Image (cartoon, coloured by chain):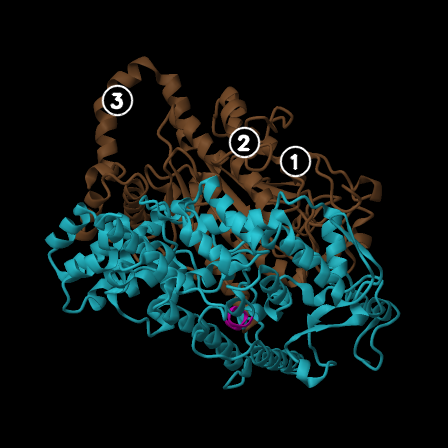
Amino acid sequence: MTLADQDLRAAIAATRFGLGAKPGEIAEARRDPQGWLREQIRREGADQPAGGETSAQRLGEFREYQQEQRTARLQQTSMAATDANAGADGQPAAMPARDPVKVVGNMLRQDIGRDFSARTQLAVTTEAAFRERWANFWANHFTVSATKVITGTIVGPFESEAIRPHVFGRFADLLGAVESHPAMLTYLDQVQSIGPNSQAAEYLKTGGPRGFGAASLQQVANRSAGLNENLAREILELHTVGIGGGYTQGDVTEFARAMTGLSIGGPRDPASAAGTAVFHARAHEPGERMVMGVRYRAGGDDQAGAILADLAAKPATARFVCAKIARHFVADEPSPALVDRLEAAWTSSKGDLAKVAEALIAAPEAWAPTQAKFKTPYEFIVSSYRAAGAQPTDFQRIAPILTALGQKPFSAPSPKGWPEDAQSWAAPDAIVKRMQFAQAFSGAAVRDRDPKTLAADALGARLTPDTAKAVARAESRAEGFALLLMSPEFQRR
Amino acid sequence: MNALMTPTRRGLLAGAASFGLALELIAVPAIAADADLARRKVIVVICRGGMDGLSVAPPVGDSEYRGLRGALALNDAALPLDGTFGLHPALTSVHALAQAGEARIAPAIATPDRARSHFEAQDVLETGAAGVYSAASGWLNRAVEALSTHRKIDALSVGATAPLILRGKVQTASWSPGRTVDAEARLPTLLQDLYRNDPLLGPALARGLATEVMAQAATADMAAQPAAMTGPAPTAGGAQALRQGRDAARALGVSLAGFMREPNGPQVAAISLDGFDSHANQAGLLNQRLAYMDGALDGLHAGLGPEWKNTVVLVATEFGRTARVNGTAGTDHGTASTALVLGGALKKGGIVGDWPTLKQNALFENRDLAPTLDMRGLFKGVLAEHMGVDRAVLESKVFPDSAAAKPVLGLV
């Protein structure tokens, strides 16, 4: 291998496989770019962001919030009924000085902010950026989103508990952890799904819980109990075999029936189960199930577990997920040869994700010089901080930027997750907003350093003569650094 | 810089003056028709997540409706339209337009896709293809491409990311609320030079800067910009947050209208509203999302002012939802839904398409409202009669393989 090749591979290792080079990183990767990446793979999984509140703790907070809300609503109703001095707009004239609903609501929002901050800090500072990118890929594959408030409070804990420990383990284990996590169960409505012929449904049909004097018959009737097929459909369509994976509407419904009973611990469960995944046998649809041509015998949560295990092992799952890995790391339209390599590693190792990661590092297609990937807003912001050797200290600074760029923190628009293709992110408005960020960021971030050095550190052999010249000719350090961040080769990886 | 910007009003007037005489002499009727066409506008509002048509325009007069919808049935709360249909109570502005003959419903409409997958159905809705993954560009972009051979025409999407419906050969603008930018500053100028050989970033930046120039004129009279409308549901003060959300949506509608009223502004626009996937607790969710939609449409109507009479707004979703309520006070993915057609350019009339009824044997796969109208037929009719897209091009390029979906004619 020539020296030029080695320089380019070091730059590719840090920018395409990693999250963008920090000063000195390309030099370090240069000794053995592939080895430098391989060393980042480890059985115990990805790094954990600082913090560490659990889903159960957060859901406890959320329940408290809901109770406060309910109390406040009741108070409002009684005030509106008794207080003839209601404001002109129909709102009660007087509000409590410190609204407990707002207080707890703010606390929840701060939790989300802290989680996202910690995750971004980790991405910006880590020495093992390939490992972090690999974890980010899986978090997006198994998207849960703060577009649902209750889920938002545990997106961070979800990544820590269900994703990060398993990203270099077996896909089947990752899948099992993800689909039974409270965040996924709330995000895709599984918590409320009840077998239509289960004991719980019968109980509700025949009058529901007694002793609740306030509940009118109408209210009981409204609380219709039954199936919700959202999670079952998205597991098939997005998490495992994919849309062309050979399932029907009937399979979706059968799978949804098999998963009934899977929920999170509520007030009637033992205190130890609060806010964690539980199986309510009484809500489980009785009987055997038939999913994608396989019969699953009647049982409890083992029924859904068996279906998930079979889905994880399907060749369609290997194909679908490997193609997605190739699209994330290498190109919006990756070469079939690359997908074949990843798939072969997946199949021969029975879905060992460490082996798939090794196959990606070993694949010649993954080292093509062409920069075929356009950075997502998160990747752009993280790599900008890395290039500056700076740290985002304040969520209030990065959240509005990401929102303006179309990637609001922890808030993917749908279970499909964030898009990965250039077309989605390179809209005219987005480029203007990236430029505005670069302009505002570079002033403070460049400090007294030479932007020429920063450019060489960030891009290595990928720095083009055009960009180097533009940076050198800039009229200020800040302008030079902004030009680097906005250069075609920094916008891509 | 000037070459990248859309022509100024003054430049345009000067151009018209120098050509005026010759044009008047040779082609008065054609110019009149062209000038009329050049003012026509079409706006597509995509409601993502599978919007429940039976809630948008509840068929309160259908004998099966109450039974199927149980607690979710709107009944007396619906705003009356005719003997069969009402509108969701949150759609007050749409209702006022309907009363004036400027809004109509297509109550049983669907794309050709039947897979009940959000992503597949949205792709089909936006590509205008007969099936999934058979086209890489959006039908609205191809319509702009067809029109651009006859006249100068521009398209704009609202949002930081470009929706598939407007992606394709023709470079279109995108805009979202934010700080203004000085297009003459050094950094944009230097970047345009650095991007001169970049096929992605070069045109995108040029286009973005030109839009910024227009935005400063279009939004000059607007106060605070709207907050994100797609974020989490409000966490405090339900009624107040709902009002704020609706106001923000209305402001966004007014902004978009402002762009379209600018000289050389876009005549074609696309905007997305998210969050219609109502698997659970549908009533509260739709109260909010439909209020936002109503706000956005109200903003378009108000903001377009005298241009409203030249405008057709199409509101569509990727699929409807199950006719029956599911086990969690919501509905699951279904088939036909309701589309709205609005605008001062509309002719008065009743529902668009037929009503299949909700009788059990009329339901699609004994589960969903059955489609009686192919969405492409509605789009084709509006593009042909309102925007003047050539019929042959419409069939061959804009909506290939859509012969079965006859254009809905007579709407304008």
Is B344 included in the stretch rendered in magenta?
no
Quadrant of the image occupied by residue A358:
bottom left
**Secondary element at image label 1:** loop
**Circle 1 Cα neighbour tier, 10 Å, few/some/many (<14 / 14–19 / ≥20):** many
Name the one closer to the observer, A380 or A16. Answer: A16
Is the stretch drawn in magenta largely helix, strand or loop?
Answer: helix
Q: Is residue A221 left or right of residue B298?
A: right
Residue corresponding to mark 3: B20
Where residue A110 appears, x then y in whole percent?
Answer: 46, 76
Where residue A418 appears, x then y in whole percent?
Answer: 48, 55
Residue corresponding to mark 2: B382
Q: Which chain is brown?
A: B
Q: Which residues are magenta?
A: A155-161
Q: Are marks 1 and 3 on the same chain?
A: yes
Separation of marks 1 and 3 at Cα, in angstroms: 42 Å
Residue type marked 3: Gly
Where residue A194 appears, x then y in whole percent?
Answer: 77, 65
Residue corresponding to mark 1: B352
Q: Residue at x 67, y 43 (%)?
A: A246
Q: Is residue B252 left or right of residue B181?
A: right
Which colour is chain A painted?
A: cyan
Name the one closer to the observer, A309 or B284. Answer: A309
